[in-house]
Image: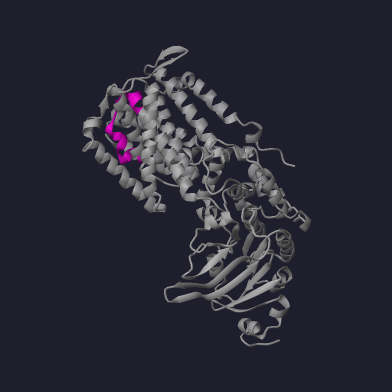
Amino acid sequence: MKPAPRSRRRPFLVEGLTALGLIVAPYVLPHLGFAPNTVNQILVWGLFGLGFDILFGFTGLLSFGQSAFFGSGGFIAAYLLTQDMIASVPLALLIGTLGAMAIGVLVGLIALRRTGIYFAMITVAIAEMFYFLENSPLSAWTGGENGIPGVPTPKIEFIISWHVGTGWSMYWFLAACYFVGIVVALRIVRSPVGAVLSAIRDNPLRAEAVGHNIHSYKLTAFVIAAAYAGLAGGLLGILQAFMPPEAFIFDTSGQLVMQTAIGGPGTLFGPLLGAAVWLSLQDFLQEFLQRALGLGSAWKLVLGLVFVLLVCFLRHGLVGGIKDLYRLATHRRQAEAEAPEEATPIRAALDSMPARAREGDLKAGTILEAKGLTKRYGGLVANSDIDFTVKVGELRGIIGPNGAGKSTFFKMLTCEVPPSGGTIVFEGQDITGKGVTEVCQLGLTKSYQVNQLFTRLTVRQNLTIAALADLRGRFRLDLFRSLEKIPGLQDRVQHTLGLIGLTARADTPVSALAYGEKRRLEIGLALATSPSLLLLDEPLAGMSPRERVETVQLLKSIARGRTMIVIDHDMDSLFELVEWITVLQEGRVLTEGTPDQIKSDPAVREAYLGGVHA
């Protein structure tokens, strides 16, 4: 058995090394030419980047509007302090952070209605709107183009009295804030919420299909990023004793994106390293090109060139490059390039995993009933007036020629696409028009004809994400909960690994699996949600003869205690597996019967062979 991952054996290693680095930095960095003000700015930008990395690096949402929250949190804190409304700097920072979070909720509800480039463009527009508000309608409170001067430094009254000054004295306050920020961020990304966010980044369609409410999780990541931005904005005002209006401009968001790209997204420490490189280069180039050589603003051109080169040659950023060097030094790449271990044999049917009992589950009778199910795409009718009934515990097969409407029919049953007409009743409940997440939580799920996996994650992480949806529900804000503390999670994942024969490959990235292994993992993702009704869309497609035999055994095993519907073109395997078969042709039910009846049905032979009889 493989040893436990290093993160499990040394759970606080990263936090300890971070604390050590922050303590040592002021004694080392001055000898490398770093001025205290530059180091302090790096910490502020690094903290700013922590939230953005959770949003972009871990969730896959690229926002160019973080300046709106950066400026909002900063101006709220600065206004409270300079107007003597609050004397406590930490309290003002907290209120500014909460204000940024409230704004993040409102903005997120709007922006997250779209994805991809449209989401990014909405965030740009909202950031520009905030810049306009700060400079014009709200200038009486924000100072407009003059900003807010006179922001005081903190005075800490806890056991001893400490009045934070400037320079290295300010460093210790900012370092403490950054350390708290990185500890919180690490807890978030290691939590169940963090696991779901990584799944959304990789494959939002499948994350939703296994039962997670991805919109709520995206909004959570957006608000977390806004909170970090608001806190960093408040610290910027304290650092400079002045809250600048430039906090709201697009350039602020652009620099944040570039620093994260340089350092490495999805690493948490990437933004800090990127800020160190970006600000250091900026200071050096300004000093050398502008002042020493008199080349004016040419330093901006050189800085942009350096950014392009770094992104082109270090696609995963500096932290990613360091990780690659570490793998080379420890020969991990060579180990990964070797022939994969032989897959663990699929367990016998006696080791099957029954469906989880849910309130309202049926013990007998009809589990699924579709009446008059129709799907039209304009003038094209994919399915027409289908009546379909499945009993509890039944193994049902669906066959039909290519283009018969089988996949569309499956998508309607799992509520991936809404029917144009008809109703679907699952366990006595009308699910017509419900979302795929909701029906998965009810106990109805499917595997896909084309693999829908989380390819940047390991096999174990894939199954963990699927199991979390069943064990935690659609959405839960357990941001600081450890995955190891979720009852039944590890047992569920380990048992599923054994059932699908991938125990030896549990910690292998999905991208390194063979095709047959990916197909079994595709089944495993559906199985890990513990459904009472499991729909499998061509589970045997692309497998070798041996893999097909093993997979049929697997399907027989997992059918115990649940109902199953299978589509496949491998007639021999399907007839061996199922008890009753429905034949579709041209979007309609052609006939139904036992495997023996279907084999001898002339209408079926006509549909498949065009009238050619054996």
- On whether residue 156 falls in the magenta region, the answer is no
- On whether residue 249 falls in the magenta region, the answer is yes
Q: Nearer the viewer, residue 405 or 232?
A: 405
Q: Main secondary structure of the magenta part?
A: helix
Vertical placement of residue 441 versus 271, above or below: below
Q: Nearer the viewer, residue 422 or 189?
A: 422
Residue drawn at the location 72% of the way across and 51% of the way down: 498
Q: In the rendered image, which quarter is residue 403 located in? A: bottom right
Across the whole image, how many numbered discs are drawn on residues? 0
* Residue span colored magenta: 235-253
Residue 149 position within the rendered picture, expressed as x and y whole percent measured from the top left: 26, 24
Coloring scheme of the render?
Answer: one colour
Specify whether 18 is left or right of 351. Answer: left
Extreme residue in the top direction: 160
Q: Is residue 510 visible?
A: yes
Quadrant, the N terminus? top right
Quadrant, the C terminus? bottom right
Residue 300 position within the rendered picture, expressed as x and y whole percent measured from the top left: 32, 38
Q: Is residue 340 visible?
A: no
Residue 587 position within the rendered picture, expressed as x and y whole percent measured from the top left: 54, 76
Vertical placement of residue 299 versus 534, above or below: above
Residue 120 position within the rendered picture, expressed as x and y whole percent measured from the top left: 38, 49
Vertical placement of residue 509 versus 389, above or below: above
